[in-house]
Amino acid sequence: MGGGEDSVERKPWWARPPVLVTSLVLLWSAHLAASYLQTDWAHNDFERFDDLRLTILFFGLSVGLCTAHVALYAARPPLARRTIWLTLLASAVLVLASFPVGSRDVFSYAMFGRVWATYHANPFVVAAAQFPDDPWHRWTSVSLNRPVAAYGPLFMWQSWPINAIAGDQLWLVVGLHKLVATLGFVASIGLVGDLLPRSNSVEYAPTWPLVLLAWNPLFLFETAGSAHNDSAMVVLLLATLWCWQRERFNLAVALLALSFWYKWYGIILVPALLIDTLRAAGLRRACERAGLGVAIGVAIGFVLLAPLPHALPTIVHELLHPEKMRGIFPTELPPPLAVLFYLIRATGWFEVDFGYQLFDALRFGLFGIAVALICRRQWRDAASFGALIEACALILLALCFLLITQLWPWHLLAPIALAIARGSAAWLVLAVVLTLLGLLSYFLTFGIATVLLAAVVSSVWVLRRARA
């Protein structure tokens, strides 16, 4: 697996493969040790640290991982396939063994499975908070004061067997969720590696961009570290595009419908797939695939919801009034919405309902305009698989940065994976930038992280110009 024509000796010292590999392993080893420094494990996450020194330590580790990722992108080192996979394996084992300090979500996953498998209650109807005497309850977040809404029944089917296997062993449940997410990460690497040359319309495309995913610190942290279920969504969306490119359209439609029942946002890729169908096969075939998607989606939903009675009304309510699109969380807003929020707040309009209505109207309007422009761009560009990947990635970015009011780092996994699968220079830069923003946003708001990153890039550019 090659990454360039220069020999290792001609690379600067920081760009040599042994230095990059050693840096990654040492940083993840330090992360593993730091994750157990907090003695009160029930409050051992970034939001609950009561020791500023721990926050500073993890911020320093994140900056180190960001620096290593930028160095990897800048160096494009020639790496043997064996080196890539062994480094990934070593990093994944270290992160798997670490405490999930990123968020409490994996403990919530464990509790959802426990509500269904142990207490035989419907987690879409019965909130986990109704079992306050459960020993696992103190590990979970306040979001469990209401029934599950953000995830679909397919995810519940993942949680149920894990709970059934592990029983009352909380740490085994957590470990299994982390392992599932890590396996999803590995599957994503395989799919992206197969999509890279096809999205560039050549028999062979440089495979060094794949290392940006295999050694991606945000992916490792969110999968092996935090077990976020967006890992499965990335696999389902990549598999949909993999089948689509091979003209296995029915299977692709089925996978996209399946992703909808895992976590709802996969449905927003439908316009890009329909436009691709319209251009390639005409209106009739587009209608046929749309109808097939609806039929398969309904059938899958019927099967998945059969053992979860009365869950459908909760799901319908969530789709009509999604949690991440109702409330305004100023410190968790994506940068464009943060600017919009503070502009409206400066006018004093948030003192009355008009301000909230204006904020919602503008963000939904901006999202609609963005999707329309993306579809227009896809329609006007030359038909290609690369154009389809770009359209899907842009729609996911529009969702993250123009619509949801709680932009968590793990929401960026799907856009990053698609950007790397596209493989062109601009998209790889975007993937690196999103990775850095995701890691830094754990300690800074997305807005501040964006400003900080822009300042660093500008400073480097000015220094290089001055040197030239």
Image (cartoon, rainbow, N blue to C red):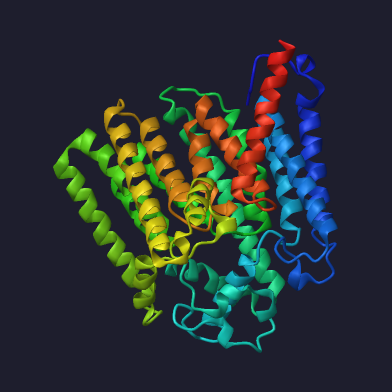
Vertically, is 188 above or below 5?
Answer: below
Q: Position of residue 355 (x, y in %)?
A: 42, 60
**Would residue 273 appear left or right of 53 to someone viewing this image?**
left
Quadrant including the C terminus: top right
Q: Residue at 53% x, 58% y: name it.
A: 406
**Would residue 226 appear left or right of 195 to someone viewing this image?**
right
Q: Position of residue 286 (x, y in %)?
A: 20, 44
Residue furthest to the front in view is: 347
Quadrant including the N terminus: top right
Residue furthest to the left in view is: 284
Vertically, is 289 above or below 22?
Answer: below
Do we see residue 255 in this rendering? no
Nearer to us in this view, 173 or 112: 112
Vertically, is 22 above or below 361?
Answer: above
Nearer to us in this view, 446 or 188: 446
Residue furthest to the top in view is: 468
**Would residue 386 appear left or right of 92 to someone viewing this image?**
left
Q: Position of residue 167 (x, y in %)?
A: 64, 79
Q: Position of residue 430 (x, y in %)?
A: 54, 34
